[in-house]
Image (spheres, helix red, strand yellow):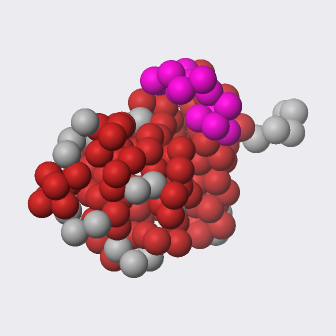
Amino acid sequence: MRVTAEVFAEHGFDGATISAISKATGVPTSTIYYNFDGKLEILAFLLRAWLNRTSVVVQEAVAGADSAAVRLARLIDAHMYSMAHDPSTFQVLFAEQGRIGRLPDVSDAVQEVFHRPLAELLVQGAADGSLKDVTVETATSVIYGAVTFSGLRRIVTSDGAVPAFDPGLVSAEVGEIVLKGIVPE
């Protein structure tokens, strides 16, 4: 799967071909067509698998009796870990947002993995006093953007290594800004 994601990441959905996927993976074209109806189904399979793996680490991160702020920091860690350890699939997920709309289950999974846990933590944090009471939709977009673009920038500038970057270091930097801001106290 990782090699297939690399083909999509390198060539884009339109530029990736079944032949290129076959060549890169060593899986005969006939076997690919036997298992998948085409590129969109392969893309959906890749994204579903990544989102399922990420969902597991996200659910672990947000579980527990810690304050919402502590669990938010763990949520940022979980997302950074998932991006760093499968950078090509994340890059494809980001690049193909328009196509994901044609895959309702994948679109729903993106909401379940990224947006809903974050929104729930923001509401819980306002209730437990560990986070400010904010407009959830706006704060979710800001935090999602900070996490996504911080990871994506490092993926794009990496040398192809896996992990693509040190997720703990980037998570700590992003978490510091998200939770404490940039204005000196």
* x then y, percent, for residue 88: 47, 41
Q: Nearer the viewer, residue 167 or 106?
A: 106
* Residue at 29 percent of width and 37 percent of height: 25
Task: List x then y, in percent, for residue 160.
Answer: 54, 26
In the rendered image, which quarter contains the N terminus? top left
Q: Residue at x 42, y 30 (%)?
A: 85
Provide residue 96's location: percent of width, then percent of height: 51, 62
Depicted 24 relative to depicted 18: above or below: above
- Within the image, what quadrant is residue 54 found in? top left
Side of 18 where 155 appears, left or right: right
Q: Residue at x 64, y 37 (%)?
A: 156
Q: Which residues are magenta?
A: 153-166
Q: Quadrant of residue 176?
A: top right
Identify whether 85 is placed above or below 45.
Answer: above
Residue 158 within the magenta-colored segment of the rendering: yes
76 falls in the magenta region: no
Q: Quadrant of residue 28?
A: top left
Question: Vertically, is 35 above or below 86?
Answer: below
User: Residue at 21% of width from left, 42% of height from top?
Assistant: 27
